[in-house]
Amino acid sequence: MKKHTELKKYKKLIDKNGIVHIVYYASDIHDIIHPLSIEENEILSEDFVGFLEKYRPLIHPKAPTVLEISGKQFSEEEQTLINNTIWSNFCMNMTHADIEARACVKSIVLYLIYTVISALLLFSVKNISDEVIVNLAYMPFWFFGYRLLIYIILDCMPLWNLRKWYRQLASTYVFFSGSKDTVFNDISEEELSKEIKEYLTETYKKLQNNRMALRYIKEKGLIELGCRVNSIEDIIMNPLAKGREYMSGVLAGYIGLAEPFFRHDCRMTLEIKGKAFSEEEKVGIRNAIKNYYGLRVASEERDMLDNRRKIYLFSVLAFISCIMVFLWGAKVDIAMHEFIVMIFWFFGDYLLEFILINNFGFKKRRKILKNCMDMEVSFNPDNAG
């Protein structure tokens, strides 16, 4: 009871005057912006994004979000950079969620068509006395109908909610309190309301036409990545392992933030700024990137092989259960008959899932990862020239 009361007080504080107020302490700009970021290609740090993730249940699409950054007193240039980075990063995330949601809608339409066709097929064979044919017609109907509900309830709706959340974060009103201790309860609604409403009106207009990441990739056929490093350890996990170099977790996590936009039909480039590397180190860096994505390709191929084995196994089991329905269907009681039919539908449903969903998903990811292996790496050290 005490915890419940404290939670209600906490939520009331967050949603005071209909404004979601979040306070983040930053001792350095890298607490907000990823340390490997380069100019005009800044990415938010994983800790900062993870911090905002904790507030997702309290952020409402209709409630303005205010982010107070305390701690270090940032300069005007740094404040502008932080604002732009928050805007651009969550715009990209919103665009990706939008892409996924639209792809989900296409899948819904496709599965709806399949469900209608399978329903018509089922209706046409309903009067046939052969029970095996009727059960074979039932299987695609239930499969496509079930997948249709899954896409609508469990896939599409959460994506649209995620898109709204990213939209809200992209339009977050940021103010910097520095080392001053500000208490949100002492800030009147009038002091923030007008400025926030003007800011939200401006950002929402920009968000309505935002397709920058997707449009850029489609028009240019190019995915450009960039990072700034201070040492080779920022890139390679073990620089001494000649010929077996592997990309560091820091760089893998940094590039991974852009992975939702990776495509198999686009040229990929990575520009590395900062430290000047020798020719031998450059070869090691390229090998590390290729080895990292090569292992991921091998992992996808192993999963594809496992999926292929499951297809063979469930094909045999579905065939055996089909024979059981055909041979024993009329010779057993109703309960046993329904049990045999249920087994047949179980194996048939998983067989269709392994063929139509898993198989194509593995192939798509493998193509993207193979494209990452051919990533063009260039070096632009600070002391060049």
Image (tube, grey):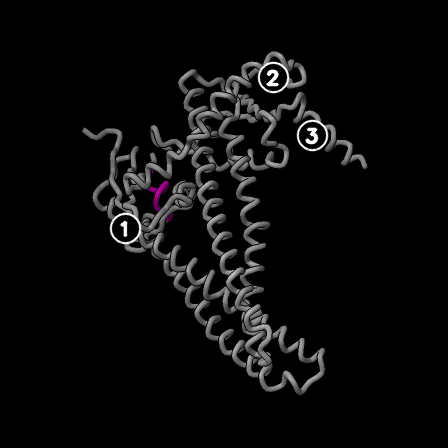
Given contact means CB atoms under 8 Å apart, are the residues at marks 2 and 3 in contact?
no
Graded by Cα atoms within 10 Å as few (under 14), some (14 to 19) or many (20 or more), the crowding at tag 1 reads: some
- Residue 342 left/right relative to 374: right
Quadrant the N terminus occupies: top right
Residue linked to disc 3: 11
Residue type (three-letter) at the residue carrying disc 1: Asp
Q: Is residue 180 visible?
A: yes
| Tag of residue 374 | 1
Residue at image position (28%, 39%) is 220
* Residue, disc 2: 181
Residue for point 62% across, 12% down:
190
In which quadrant of the rendered image does the C terminus lie? top left
Along the line of sight, the residue nearer the viewer: 274 or 190: 190
Considering only vertical position in the picture, is 18 above or below 35? above
Front residue of this view, candidates 355 and 253 = 355
> In percent of the image, x 58 and y 64: which residue is there?
142
Residue 257 position, x and y percent, is 43, 41
Instruction: Count neighbours of disc 2 (C-alpha within 10 A) and say few if under 14, some if 14 to 19, many if 20 or more.
Output: few
Q: Amino acid at mark 2?
A: Asp
Proximity of marks 1 and 3: CB atoms separated by less than 8 Å: no
> Judging from the image, what secondary structure is the residue with disc 3 in?
helix
User: Regarding mark 2 in the picture, which secondary structure is present there?
Assistant: loop
Taking the magenta stretch, the answer to whether it contains residue 193 is no
Q: Nearer the viewer, residue 119 or 53?
A: 119
Q: CA distance from mark 2 to mark 3?
A: 21 Å
Q: Which residues are magenta?
A: 230-237
